[in-house]
Image (spheres, helix red, strand yellow):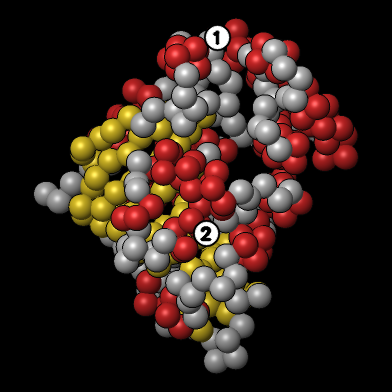
């Protein structure tokens, strides 16, 4: 998608004014000439990622995309069949490295993928050649779109890293058109003792520079490959058990590095959807199968598992 074809969708988040390209094509501007953001590598940049550098580093360092797995995860965590995406206008709210953006683009959707960090650069590389995909580096609380722009909006594993998850949820919700779908996946609140352990450790790890934190993430990735031990120890200290070593390092870093990490309940997320004007709500089950896993998930004993809801914006 060219920048020109993106412009009709854009408006200034503060004033509602339409946005356009400057004469030299180097910036997005309002009709009064005020510069809203710079264009770099064909990507509008409305923010910097100074306070979110861990995410920018994470998604530009690790190669964690796996096409079959990403398609399965997308379907499980959005409740939307990939075959139904063709012709939709879709917002990936917090695209990270672009794994799920690519899924939508390859399925024939027109996709706008937004992230606050320079992860959009890696995402753009991953989606190179998909003609109906475009990227924005922007604050998800102040996205430059008119209300009711999108047929489908999804956010997987992003909103709980904002200082206030609810505010971010509410900022994105109006972008869904009446009759459109909104799917959100957030970290699940675990048992009190797990939350206490996690908060205590993260009070240290979230303040460590990457050079000091990364060896611990590598150690976690190594432990994640040890049978039985990985299933027991990570109920107390979270680390990834993904089959890929690089994914395990990335996922473990993603857990311990971010400044903010909020955990939520299903009932809490359902109430947000209702209050934002959504109905036909569906609580999506975990992607992993198995009776024991499902029991542990229901008992809130799985750090890193999610609460996952999808709903349709009411038309009244």
Residue placed under numbered mark 1 in the picture: 192
Task: Locate residue 167: give its quadrant.
Answer: top left
Mark 1 crowdedness (10 Å alpha carbons): few <14, some 14-19, many ≥20: few
Residue placed under numbered mark 2 in the picture: 102
> Furthest-bottom residue in view?
23
Residue 133 is tagged as none
**Local secondary structure at mark 1:** helix
Seen in the picture, residue 104 relative to 265 is either above or below; the reply is below
Please tell me which residue lies in front, 114 or 98.
98
> Furthest-left residue in view?
316
Q: Is residue 13 left or right of residue 102?
A: left
Contact, mark 1 vs mark 2 (Cβ under 8 Å): no
Question: Visible in this render: residue 3?
Answer: yes
* Front of the two marks 1 and 2: 2
Mark 2 crowdedness (10 Å alpha carbons): few <14, some 14-19, many ≥20: many
Seen in the picture, residue 40 relative to 311 is either above or below; the reply is below
Q: Is residue 168 left or right of residue 152?
A: right
Residue 100, image x, y percentages: 51, 52
Task: Locate residue 226: give its quadrant.
Answer: top right
Residue 210, image x, y percentages: 82, 40
Please tell me which residue lies in front, 186 or 49.
186
What residue lies at 23% left-to-right and 47% top-to-bottom? Answer: 313
């Amino acid at each position: 998608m060219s920048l020109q074809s993106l412009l009709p969708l854009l408006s200034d988040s503060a004033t509602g004014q339409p946005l356009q390209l400057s004469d030299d094509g180097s910036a997005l501007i309002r009709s009064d000439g005020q510069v809203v953001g710079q264009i770099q590598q064909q990507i509008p940049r409305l923010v910097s990622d100074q306070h979110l550098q861990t995410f920018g580093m994470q998604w530009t360092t690790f190669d964690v995309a796996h096409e079959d797995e990403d398609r399965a995860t997308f379907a499980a965590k959005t409740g939307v069949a990939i075959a139904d995406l063709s012709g939709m206008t879709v917002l990936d709210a917090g695209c990270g490295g672009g794994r799920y953006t690519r899924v939508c683009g390859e399925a024939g959707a027109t996709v706008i993928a937004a992230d606050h960090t320079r992860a959009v650069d890696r995402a753009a590389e991953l989606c190179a050649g998909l003609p109906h995909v475009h990227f924005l580096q922007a604050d998800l609380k102040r996205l430059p779109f008119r209300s009711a722009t999108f047929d489908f909006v999804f956010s997987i594993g992003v909103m709980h890293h904002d200082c206030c998850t609810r505010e971010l949820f509410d900022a994105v919700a109006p972008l869904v058109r009446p009759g459109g779908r909104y799917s959100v996946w957030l970290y699940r609140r675990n048992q009190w003792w797990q939350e206490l352990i996690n908060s205590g450790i993260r009070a240290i790890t979230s303040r460590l520079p990457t050079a000091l934190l990364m060896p611990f993430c590598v150690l976690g990735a190594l432990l994640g490959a040890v049978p039985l031990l990985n299933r027991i120890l990570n109920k107390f200290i979270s680390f990834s058990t993904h089959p890929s070593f690089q994914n395990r390092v990335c996922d473990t870093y993603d857990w311990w590095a971010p400044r903010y990490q909020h955990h939520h309940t299903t009932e809490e997320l359902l109430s947000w959807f209702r209050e934002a004007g959504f109905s036909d709500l569906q609580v999506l089950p975990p992607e992993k199968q198995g009776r024991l896993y499902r029991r542990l998930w229901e008992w809130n004993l799985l750090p890193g598992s999610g609460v996952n809801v999808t709903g349709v914006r009411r038309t009244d």
